Image: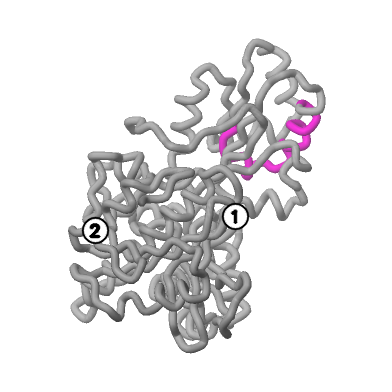
């Protein structure tokens, strides 16, 4: 897979690099640390060796004192190895440990507290539009998402469907995370209809033909495998009665499309609308993780159903973003942003749409969605 430079940067401290499969963690490490001592726990032989003798890691590092970077791929495959890493870090040998993983579930279930704060937790997301530059096409992104492994494929659609199979087979079935893989597959399909909506666990349970408690566990599995995330309502200094339940998104617009069944009764505009909202969500989520300071992503909805798709709140400011899969801006499209502006006049408000013109209406910047995504870079919001 050809390497496209990433916006993500790392410091000199030890860190966990977490992200779903296919986001390019291994490729990024190979380019960032070309001379590193690399241990790939996806390799069955390597995994067997370190499972039988975790202290072999100490012997390997002692025999390579000039290796200043130690990369351990898919650390969740063998959480007990972190005990050895912890001891090696305590030795203060001036070597940096980079520990990649596609699941935080095993680490937490085994009581590993991410090395007791000795290694920071970083996240690598699918591509941002700014990383692709001239290669970026919003139409292509809505069809296939932004996963590096998909963009590098000759047949992106086939890779997307295989990607779903990979997680069902390797991460869910082989790890014994669920007893009934068929029920989990129905759950994934049901969740594709919940993408971008306030999460109704009872409705998902009914569509999945399982109990509500089972669905709660399944949603946690999706989050632990980094395949989906929930957005809470923005409630800071609230002046109105707000909604109480979170919204759900798949981590990538292409993964949403791969899980969403299509047929003659499915409207292309509905599918594109969900994909567009998810595409913006994943960009804002990456922006929050890549930017300096602490930022959190929310949504905003009153009990009267006045809603804004996304609210970013953090050290750099307060931003409200509404997304519309339409070519024109209608007055009613600005209703939620106007209400938010009344409650939070210091906020910067955006309406993203599929048209071509930049407009300023009622102190709301209306921007073509493609332009906004291309201009969105860490520590800088489009103006």
Q: Secondary structure at mark 1?
A: loop
Residue 46 in sight from this viewpoint: no
Question: Residue 243 colored magenta?
Answer: no
The spot of residue 78 in percent (x, y) is 67, 41
Q: Main secondary structure of the magenta part?
A: helix
Q: Nearer the viewer, residue 198 or 349?
A: 349
Residue at the image point whose x is 31% and y is 71% from the top: 261
Local crowd size for mark 2, using a 10 Å CA cut-off: few (<14), some (14–19), many (≥20): some
Question: Residue 79 colored magenta?
Answer: yes
Local crowd size for mark 1, using a 10 Å CA cut-off: few (<14), some (14–19), many (≥20): few
How far apart, in angstroms, are the residues tagged by discs 2 and 1?
49 Å
Is residue 244 rendered to the left or right of residue 320? right
Residue 268 in sight from this viewpoint: yes
The spot of residue 235 in percent (x, y) is 60, 73
Is residue 373 shown above or below 363?
A: above
Q: Secondary structure at mark 2?
A: loop
Mark toward the start of the polypeptide (2 vs 1): 1
Identify residue for label 2. 358
Identify residue for label 1. 175
The quarter of the rendered structure image containing the N terminus is: top left
Residue at the image point whose x is 62% and y is 51% from the top: 104
- Magenta stretch, residue numbers: 72-88
The spot of residue 170 in percent (x, y) is 51, 52
Residue at the image point whose x is 22% and y is 56% from the top: 139
Is residue 33 shown above or below 116?
A: above
Is residue 176 shown above or below 151?
A: below
**Disc number for residue 334:** none
Is residue 170 rendered to the left or right of residue 4? right
């Amino acid at each position: 897979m050809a390497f496209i430079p990433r916006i993500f940067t790392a410091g000199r401290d030890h860190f966990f690099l977490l992200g779903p499969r296919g986001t390019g963690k291994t490729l990024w490490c190979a380019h960032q640390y070309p001379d590193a001592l690399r241990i790939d726990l996806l390799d069955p032989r390597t995994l067997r060796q370190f499972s039988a003798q975790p202290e072999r890691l100490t012997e390997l590092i002692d025999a390579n004192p000039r290796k200043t970077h130690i990369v351990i791929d898919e650390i969740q495959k063998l959480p007990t190895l972190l005990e050895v890493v912890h001891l090696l870090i305590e030795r203060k040998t001036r070597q940096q440990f980079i520990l990649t993983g596609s699941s935080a579930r095993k680490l937490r279930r085994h009581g590993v507290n991410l090395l007791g704060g000795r290694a920071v937790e970083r996240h690598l997301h699918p591509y941002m539009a700014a990383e692709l530059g001239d290669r970026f096409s919003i139409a292509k992104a809505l069809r296939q998402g932004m996963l590096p492994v998909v963009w590098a494929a000759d047949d992106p659609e086939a890779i997307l469907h295989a990607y779903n199979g990979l997680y069902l087979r390797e991460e869910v079935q082989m790890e014994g995370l669920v007893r009934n893989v068929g029920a989990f597959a129905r759950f994934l399909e049901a969740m594709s209809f919940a993408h971008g909506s306030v999460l109704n666990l009872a409705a998902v349970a009914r569509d999945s033909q399982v109990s509500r408690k089972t669905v709660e566990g399944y949603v946690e599995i999706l989050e632990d495998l980094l395949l989906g995330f929930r957005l809470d309502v923005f409630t800071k200094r609230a002046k109105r009665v707000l909604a109480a339940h979170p919204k759900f998104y798949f981590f990538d617009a292409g993964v949403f499309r791969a899980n969403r069944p299509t047929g003659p009764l499915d409207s292309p505009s509905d599918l594109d609308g969900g994909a567009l909202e998810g595409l913006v969500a994943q960009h804002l989520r990456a922006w929050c993780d890549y930017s300096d300071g602490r930022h959190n992503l929310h949504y905003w909805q009153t009990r009267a159903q006045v809603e804004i798709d996304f609210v970013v709140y953090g050290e750099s400011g307060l931003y409200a973003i509404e997304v519309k899969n339409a070519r024109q801006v209608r007055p009613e499209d600005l209703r939620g942003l106007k209400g938010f502006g009344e409650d939070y006049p210091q906020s910067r408000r955006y309406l993203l749409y599929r048209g071509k013109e930049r407009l300023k209406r009622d102190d709301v910047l209306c921007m073509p969605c493609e332009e906004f995504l291309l201009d969105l870079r860490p520590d800088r919001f489009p103006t």
